[in-house]
Amino acid sequence: TAPDVPGATLRYAGTDMKPLSVGGIGDTVFERSMYRARYRLVPRRPGALTVPPFTARVDGQKGTSEPVRLTVRKPPEAGRPAEFLGGVGRFEVEAKATPPSIRSGQTLDYEVTVTGPAARGVASPPDVSRLERLPAGFRVERRPDVVTVEPPSHTFVYRLRPTRAGDVTLPPVRVALFDPTTSRYLTKATPGVPVRVTDVPRFDPSSLNYGTPQRETSGRPRMTRDGAAATRRPRSRKGAA
């Protein structure tokens, strides 16, 4: 049973089993194995961090581990770029727009995805303010993030609604994370994403076909002012009997 760790996220990452010894007396076989449960700890704040004891129960027996005390260091302030999102470790970043072609007034989803171990510590979204200054007149709406535990990824989702037609390129988005192996900040950028916005077809009154109006023929009922139906009778010719 895993404990709650204040100031950190603790996730189960699998269990390994290793046989240690096998013996037997007659028909009775004795086997001794070691089970190692792995958990992944992601601190959310610097300073002293204590992982409370774990509890294990097997065949009515109960055991408790010792607490683990750690010191969490804050990424250095020196050299920290404005694009830093809080993640630590290796990473890649990509962007895509779905669908790539829409009409003015429709919406598309723009996604910026960070993959790799550093995605586990990403805490703040990237800067996409340049989208609102594009000629297409995008209206930007933040949507819920999509987080995958294994393999680790963090996707930022934005819903874009263009107000003007034209071919535009969504500008690159810069993302910076801290690399503990080199003790340096690494900055990577997504490629530009082309989007085509077409105008809504305009209404053309000349395209309507009303047809040829039918002439009223004798003998067909017609409506009077009071709503009653009347029948037009043919007039008699002059000189007729």
Image (cartoon, rainbow, N blue to C red):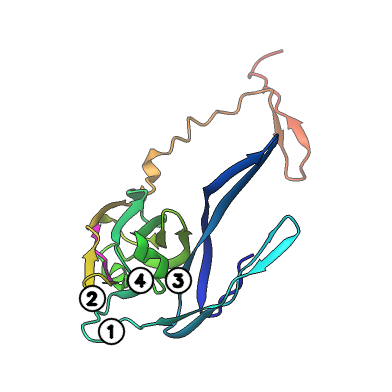
Residue 189 figure quarter = bottom left
In the rendered image, which quarter contains the C terminus?
top right
Helix, strand or loop at label 4? It is strand
In the rendered image, which quarter contains the N terminus?
bottom right
Q: Is residue 113 visible?
A: no
Q: Earlier in the sequence, mark 2 or mark 4?
A: 4
Q: Position of residue 172 (x, y in %)?
A: 23, 63
Helix, strand or loop at label 2? It is loop
Looking at the rendered structure, the kind of residue marked 2 is Ser
Q: Position of residue 201 (x, y in %)?
A: 36, 47
Looking at the rendered structure, the kind of residue marked 3 is Val
Q: Nearer the viewer, residue 224 or 234?
A: 224
Looking at the rendered structure, the kind of residue marked 4 is Gly
Looking at the rendered structure, the kind of residue marked 1 is Pro
Q: CA distance from mark 3 to mark 4?
A: 10 Å
Q: Closer to the observer: label 2 or label 4?
A: 2
**Residue labelled with disc 1:** 76
Q: CA distance from mark 2 to mark 3?
A: 18 Å
The circle drawn on residue 87 is 4
